[in-house]
Image (spheres, rainbow, N blue to C red):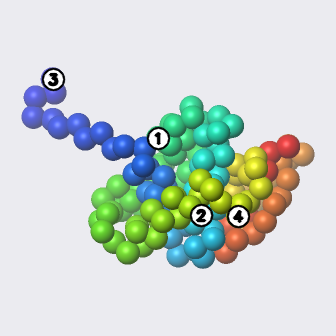
Amino acid sequence: RTEGWQVRVIPDEIWGPLNIWAESRGEPFEGQVAVGFVVRERMRLRYFSDGTVLGTVWRPSQFSWTLASDKQREKVLSIDMDDASHATARRAWDLSGASDVLPPKTVLYHAASVNPRWASSNDVKFVKQIGHHLFYQVK
């Protein structure tokens, strides 16, 4: 039964900035643009993506904040859209579509504090560190 339940559909243009805010707030603006670029490249290449922002951001195990066990998930989903840091994330998202901050095929990144197994794979190439994130292209 769905009586009494309201389903709020959140449009794609909200998910990009939310992902940037969750993944890179506190990083340099260039790093926030880079996180948006990665989402857009994943969409373009359909790399762990169905081609939509929603289907990219919420692809299982791709972005830490979307994991049910992540402590910041609730905070991200209840953000005040008028918050200054969210406005910065929206600006970064808007600029990420026409950015040359990273080269094409840059679809992966991780925090410098971790060392995921895929980062040493022959299938990826390190591109650049921006702030606390390391970015990689697929070959």
Q: Secondary structure at mark 4?
A: loop
Tell me which amino acid carries mark 2.
Val
Q: Which type of secondary structure does the marked residue at label 1 adopt?
A: helix
User: Mark 2 or 4 closer to N-term?
Assistant: 2
| Distance between mark 1 and mark 4 Cα atoms | 23 Å
50 lies left or right of 90: right
Distance CA(mark 2)–CA(mark 3): 42 Å
Marks 1 and 3, how far apart at CA: 26 Å
For marks 1 and 4 on the same chain, the one whose residue lies earlier in the sequence:
1
- In the rendered structure, the answer to whether residue 15 lies left or right of residue 62 reads left
Which residue occupies the foreground of this view, 107 or 93? 93
Q: Which image quarter is the C terminus in?
A: top right
Q: Which residue is mark 1?
A: 54
* Residue 76 image offset from top left, x and y in percent: 39, 59
**Residue 137: % across, % down:** 79, 50
Q: Nearer the viewer, mark 2 or mark 3?
A: 2
- Camera-nearest label, 1 or 4: 4
- Type of the residue with mark 3: Arg
In the foreground, 132 or 127:
127
Which picture quadrant has residue 112? bottom right
Whether residue 114 is visible here, answered yes or no, is no
Mark 2 highlights which residue? 33
Q: Which residue is mark 3?
A: 1
Q: Position of residue 49 (x, y in %)?
A: 59, 36
Give the quarter of the figure containing the N terminus: top left
Could you classify mark 3 by the number of other residues whose Cα lies within 10 Å: few (under 14), some (14-19), or many (20 or more)? few
Asked if disc 2 and disc 4 are in contact, CB closer than 8 Å, the reply is: yes
Label 4 and label 3: CA atoms lie apart by 48 Å
Q: Earlier in the sequence, mark 4 or mark 3?
A: 3
Question: Does residue 43 show up?
Answer: yes
